[in-house]
Amino acid sequence: MQDNIIAEIKQIEEQAELNAKDAVQKAAEIVNEARIAMQKTSKTAYDNAIKKVGEILTEAEKQAAELTQKIVSSGKIETDKLCEKSKQNANNAIDFILKDIII
């Protein structure tokens, strides 16, 4: 069970890393295009491209936050399950001990 949880968390982390790399690459491409556009045309094209970069990076940050929340939620759910299982095991052990004492 723990291996599945760890594998799922690693997969989510890998996806978050890929998303971040893609966003940075897209941002770098747009900044380069903006630089070239500014040299060729106008400052307006450059400003628009920089705005687009901001939007891409904001979206990447949002996705990273969502994936982080997913990791945290997944860990909490599994921790709650393990705690419940521990309680059940403790109750079973107590019942077993009491059964021997009472009989």
Image (cartoon, helix red, strand yellow):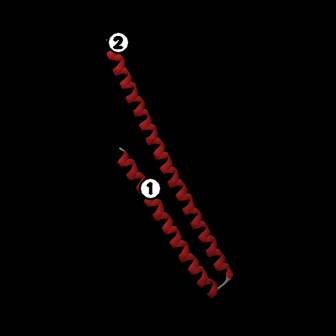
Give the residue displayed 46% in from the left and 45% down from the top: 75
Q: Amino acid at mark 2?
A: Ile
The quadrant of the image that shows the C terminus is: top left
Mark 1 or mark 2, whichever is nearer to me: 2
Q: How many marks?
A: 2
The answer to which of 86 and 44 lies nearer the viewer is 86
**Does 93 sit left or right of 76 as displayed?**
left
Mark 1 highlights which residue? 12
Give the residue displayed 51% in from the left and 72% down from the top: 25
Give the image location of residue 39, x and y in percent. Answer: 63, 87
CB-based contact (under 8 Å), mark 1 and mark 2: no
Give the residue displayed 40% in from the left and 25% down from the top: 91
Quadrant of the image occupied by residue 62: bottom right
Quadrant of the image occupied by residue 51: bottom right
Mark 2 highlights which residue? 102
Circle 2: is it few (<14), some (14-19), or many (20+) Cα within 10 Å? few
The answer to which of 78 and 53 lies nearer the viewer is 78
Which mark is first along the chain, 2 or 1?
A: 1
Give the image location of residue 85, x and y in percent. Answer: 40, 33
Q: Which mark is residue 22?
A: none
Looking at the image, is 103 positioned above or below residue 19? Answer: above
Give the image location of residue 35, x and y in percent. Answer: 60, 82
C-alpha distance separating marks 1 and 2: 51 Å
Q: Amino acid at mark 1?
A: Ile
Under circle 1, the secondary element is helix
The quadrant of the image that shows the N terminus is: top left
Circle 1: is it few (<14), some (14-19), or many (20+) Cα within 10 Å? some
